[in-house]
Amino acid sequence: MYLITLDSQTDFESWRKTARALALHQIAPADVTWSVQGRAKEAVPAGLCEAPGLPPIETDGTFSVPANFIELARIAALHRDGERFALLYRLLWRLRTDHDLLETRADPDVAQATAMAVSVHRDMQRMRDVIRFREIGREHNAHYAAWFVPEHHIVEFTAPFFARRYADMPWSILTPDICAHWDGHAISFTPGISQTEMPAPNRLEETWRRHFPDHPITPEAPKKSHRNLSKASILEPLLADAERWTGGWITPRPEAPMKRKLAADDLDALRKEAAHCRACHLYKDATQTVFGEGPKSANIMLVGEQPGDKEDLAGHPFVGPAGQMLDRALEEAGVDRKKVYVTNAVKHFKFVPRGKVRLHQKPNTPEIRACRQWYEREVSAIQPDLIVAMGATAAQSVFGKITPIGKNRGRLIDLPDGRKALVTVHPSYLLRLPDPETKVLEYQRFVDDLKIAAGLQKKAARAA
């Protein structure tokens, strides 16, 4: 009997190497017990001791398994089920002689491994959806922390997603399993926080300070753990196979893009959730959250900077002077305003009081980052074909980085998700121009930019 102890709960590469060696030595699954370093002793059958080193393989014989099994196993290995490594070795053992095993949907081992992989993927998607960072410190010394309780061992695998999304924002994700940290250059990991230490919202900063390294972050996870941080692209064939293997009885949530036909109350649910957003400090002074508005079927999304004084009081976007300017320009450009979804990069009004007047202040980068989650979720719900970024703040939110208006305006730009983007000025810019002649010329340029959107809208209407 062999007892194999892996270094960690996510040590897939060691499992893969050891499983191959065991199979080549003709060691049956019933003769192998899999464990993980640090696992409770009572979880290991009595009388077992660590397996001695396997003897050298004296034959040149080898074997191969379908590539989709490796993809399936890599994800299923992150499941919290303590028997997952034994299940995967059993499948590997059987696949040596039955290469079509994964096509047998009714097979208990295939069904169980597939269900595990889908459950892990759903947990990854849940982590991406519900993580909400809380700002600790201010401006240049700001750090962002979030608390999350995963169902499976997904933190190391999912952390690169947050590093890509919030590349220039230092953050920490605290979980009972392991804590992930990003300093703008590298991901590192520290031990998890026990459930008894789970922080209340007002204690998150205190908890973070106890667990965040005092020294500059450097990658500390074992190399084997870093090898597990594979690109999310391997999920795509896995999910397609999962549908095929299970006959459709497991339907995992797609990562992106989402289908246009979503539940009718998705936007209403987002709006209600955003009403309680505390991702940045702007909520403290603003009257309310001003969420986007427009038809769910809109194929054009207009993104502005933030609500102004009028919008903050009314609770609706673009109802003040800039909104009136926008409505007039859309009409002249031939864009049907009733078929457009309008929102802002930042959902709370930022201002400084001057007596009874509230003077507009431009949002800074941390505030834009903190609010970008709502923009992304609006895009997922609406699924527009074209996103019009009006002004520098909107462009930064849409492209995820500072994007100059001058050299990018007036042309369609491809976004990574396949949509098109159009950069132009914010209508409030036109209101601030002091010279009447310049104002007329710039207004016409703005209308010309919107005519590009009008052409796309008319083309979509004809196609429908």
Image: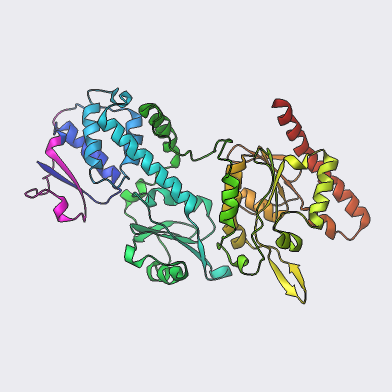
Image quadrant for the C terminus?
top right
Give the left or right position of residue 71, taking residue 406 as reference: left
Instruction: Give percent across and percent down for residue 94.
Output: 22, 28
* Closer-to-camera residue (446/459): 459
Q: Height in image: 416 above or below 188? A: above
Secondary structure mainly formed by the magenta segment: loop
Residue at x 36% of width, y 28% of height = 245
Residue at x 57% of width, y 68% of height = 140
Asked if the stretch drawn in magenta spans residue 161, the answer is: no
Picture quadrant where residue 38 is located: bottom left
Asked if the stretch drawn in magenta spans residue 50, the answer is: yes
Q: Which residues are magenta?
A: 30-59
Instruction: Give percent across and percent down for residue 195.
Output: 33, 63
Give the left or right position of residue 111, taking residue 463 as reference: left
Instruction: Give percent across and percent down for residue 246.
Output: 36, 29
Q: Height in image: 157 above or below 170? A: above
